[in-house]
Amino acid sequence: METVDIAIVGGGPAGLTAALYAARARARTVVLETGLPGGQIVTTDWVENYPGFPEGVSGAHIAELMRAQAEHFGAEFRIFASVESIEPVDLDFKVTNSEGETILAHAVILATGAVPKRLHVPGEAEFTGRGVSWCATCDGALFREKTVAVIGGGDAAVEEALFLTKFAARVYVIHRRDALRATKCIQERCFENDKIVMKWSRVVTEVLGESGKVVGVRLAATDGAPEEILPLDGIFIFVGVEPKSELVANLCELDAAGYVKVDPNGLTSYPGLYAAGDVTAGDLKQVITAAAGGASAAFEALRYIDERTCSIG
């Protein structure tokens, strides 16, 4: 069985930053990622609030730079194989992936992030990939001169609506409230865009389709107005995220929503197990907070390993 100092599960901004800090400290560091490193940031068209990029930068480019920097200091990447289990073995952890490969790690940093929530309405599952999407960057170009809708009212929803105006003829923003929750500067750009039409106080109750593709949605009103059918070619859902914490659900403490509870340094309730990024409890889910959490988790994991070594010595 292969032995490493630190196994980082997840290759988003938190995992990539943790890899940088751990590898730079000369710890043997392995990042295990189910897809391409970068996490959700890879699907973000443009990031305007990451320090050091005054004009903004694509999410994919940030991810590329982060990975290159971690690799420069010796971090190893194992991609396209999901982690199936994390099991304590004495003071270490046995990490097994979907290919049957097993790594013994002296410390583990969980940086699995979160996944977009589903609406759980009729037609959503049936038409996923046939007009229902959770990634405007991935699928926006398929809707040139079409009519689409974005479901949600936060930063992600409004930013994706703005991105979709590059392709679609009309973009509806469907929000259950009568005001957006997005940052004011993003709202201003939204309201100034002639292609965007707001549908206030509405919730999707059904995704409608014909001949294997989306043709519209059924909307219920939260303000007492009548139900309506909105014809559409596609819908993009951005109503929040759910943490991917199932790997450690039986190891450490989670909050009521399933997020991993950590102390200010990223330590979970289980010794040697750390967590960072969107999988952890906390209101602000941004690249910069994920990176900060990854740095703290790596620093503490390194100290934990050093203390173990000293006590054994």
Image (tube, helix red, strand yellow):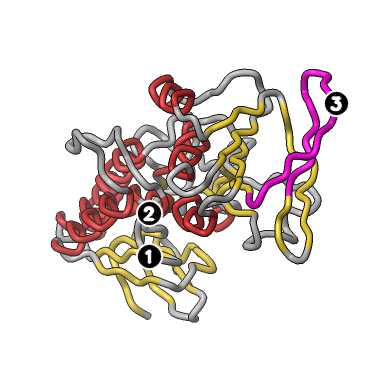
Callout 1 environment at 10 Å: few (<14), some (14 to 19), or many (20+)?
some
Front-lying residue, 193 or 160: 193
Position of residue 62 measured from the top left corner of the image (x, y, whole percent): 26, 50
Is 143 a magenta residue? no
Task: Relative to 64, say whether 44 is above or below.
Answer: above
Asked whether disc 2 touches disc 1, contact meaning CB atoms under 8 Å apart, the reply is yes
Instruction: Tell me if I can see residue 240 in this picture.
Output: no
Residue drawn at point x = 55 percent, y = 46 percent:
243
Give the residue at mark 3. 226
Q: Secondary structure at mark 2?
A: helix
Front-lying residue, 278 or 308: 278
Give the residue at mark 2. 42
In the rendered structure, which disc, 2 or 3, sits on the residue that comes first in sequence? 2
Front-lying residue, 220 or 125: 220
Residue drawn at point x = 21 percent, y = 55 percent:
65
The residue segment tinted magenta is 216-234
Residue 36's tag is 1
- Residue kind at label 2, given as amino acid type: Val
